[in-house]
Amino acid sequence: MKRLPLLCALCVSVVHSAPALNASENTLLLAGHWQLSLAPATTEKTETYPDAIALPGTLDQAGKGESAAPNIIELNRRVTFNGTAWFQRDITLPENWRGARVELTLERTRLTRVFLDGQLVATNNSLSTPHRATLLENATPGTRRLAIAVNNDPKNYPMNFSHVWSDRIQTNWNGILGQITLTAHPPVSLAGAQLFPNLKTRSLEIQLTTRNTTPSPANATHAPQINNQPPHTF
């Protein structure tokens, strides 16, 4: 039986001269009313939004799409839609976000393209992890227009009858589920951390990556803090 110390938490902070944002000030929730436009998967851009939808949610939940024919061997859906669903709304960035890096997070969705004021800023094709996109590197307060194109065309998924899109299991839904948020990050912030424990030397190497969105080099202090727990028995 071996007894090893269990590292339960690693807290890393980045100290920089720019004003800090606390947890209650740095996040905007985008759940609620969005404009909606349904288009073929090949549509590059749309300017017309004739419908509306509440997000988070799916087109199935909102009853948006074409009527589905009954099927006795698979799950039955009221409506289906294979193509690009465009979701649009205005966002207002507060004064205390001036100079911040603004990141959009979509907790669960399909293939996405993200547009800010009509300009493509990010794409993502993950089906199993949140989509994150940097909308602005150096934000200015005011109202901007955010559009998200979600593509669920089965041609994007080469796995035939996969649970990812098959009506027999998950269905080929379209929409955005979970949290939809904007987060303001300081101009100099922590972008990533990797931990490399060494059992022989009982040491831990920490490799940190810092993101700097200012036009010039910046001094930052990394202050790691490790909270030790009693030895773990296994």
Image: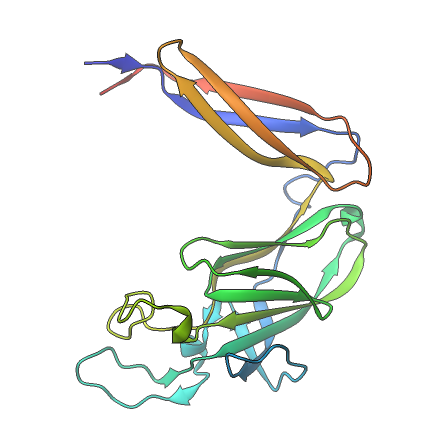
194 above or below 38?
above
Between residue 114 and residue 104, name the one nearer to us: 114
Colour scheme of this structure image? rainbow
Q: From the image, which quarter does the C terminus lie in?
A: top left
168 above or below 17?
below
Q: Is residue 28 left or right of residue 198?
A: right
Q: Is residue 42 left or right of residue 13?
A: left
Q: Is residue 229 left or right of residue 147?
A: left
157 above or below 17?
below
Q: From the image, which quarter does the N terminus lie in?
A: top left
Q: Picture coordinates of residue 174 (x, y %)? A: 44, 73
Q: Picture coordinates of residue 132 (x, y %)? A: 56, 53
Q: Residue furthest front?
A: 158
Would you identify the image quadrant in which residue 135 lies?
bottom right
Would you identify the image quadrant in which residue 105 lies?
bottom right
Residue for point 21% across, 78% down: 74
Between residue 192 and residue 224, name the one nearer to us: 192
Residue for point 79% across, 34% down: 18
Residue for point 63% across, 41% down: 23
Between residue 178 and residue 212, name the one nearer to us: 212
Between residue 27 and residue 129, name the one nearer to us: 129
Q: Residue furthest top?
A: 201
Q: Could you tell me how many numbered marks the image carries? A: 0
Residue for point 35% across, 68% down: 158
Q: Picture coordinates of residue 67 (x, y %)? A: 37, 90
